[in-house]
Amino acid sequence: MSANRDRNNPKFWEKHFESIDKKGGNYLSLDELCDSLYDKGINVSRQTFKSVLQDMDVDSDGKISKCEFVEAMSKPSLNDPKALRRAFEEMDKDKSGFLTKCEVEQVLKQNGMKYTDEDLKVMFDAVSGRDGKIDYDEFEKAMRR
């Protein structure tokens, strides 16, 4: 089975959830989500993590259940190469082949995501190789982390 098909399989995400759920409580706290991403070298502010948690937390109880996690992560849009390409192209308003901070900021605002200037700086530093823009390969790599 290909890596992409694995990511579309809910069982893949159930196992991933279990590896993150260090406390074994069958839910993920903000700390567990933060730790799992930090372990993968993804450094984003706690405020950004809170925003992600809120997006995934369907029942608004302040934590992510296994069901919520699997549902959010197995959405094909994150794992489908064609959907990723479409998302990148929609974000690339000037059709330059790169995403600028301004273009990413527009998408975050349109989706009601809360972020700080520091969040954007950290995101771009981590993803763009510090050149101030994100090409498709960098975008795809970041989305698949």
Image (cartoon, rainbow, N blue to C red):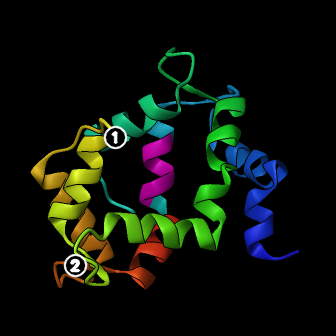
| Residue 39 versus residue 135 in the image, above or below | above
Tag 1 secondary structure: loop
Contact (Cβ within 8 Å) of mark 2 with mark 1:
no
**C-alpha separation, residue under disc 2 versus residue under disc 1:** 20 Å
Name the magenta segment's main secondary structure. helix
Q: Does residue 129 appear to the left or right of 68 in the view shown?
A: left
Q: Quadrant of residue 24?
A: top right
Which residue is depicted at the point 48% across and 61% down?
A: 39
Q: Quadrant of residue 67?
A: top right
Residue 144 appears in view? no
Q: Position of residue 91 (x, y in %)?
A: 33, 64
Disc sitting over residue 133 in the figure: 2
Which residue is depicted at the point 20% across and 54% down?
A: 105
> Which amino acid does the dot numbered 1 rest on?
Asn
Q: Does residue 32 appear to the left or right of 50 in the view shown?
A: right
Residue at the spot of label 1: 111
Q: Which residues are magenta?
A: 33-38
Mark 1 Cα-neighbour bin, 10 Å: few <14, some 14–19, many ≥20:
few
Which residue is depicted at the point 28% across and 47% down?
A: 108
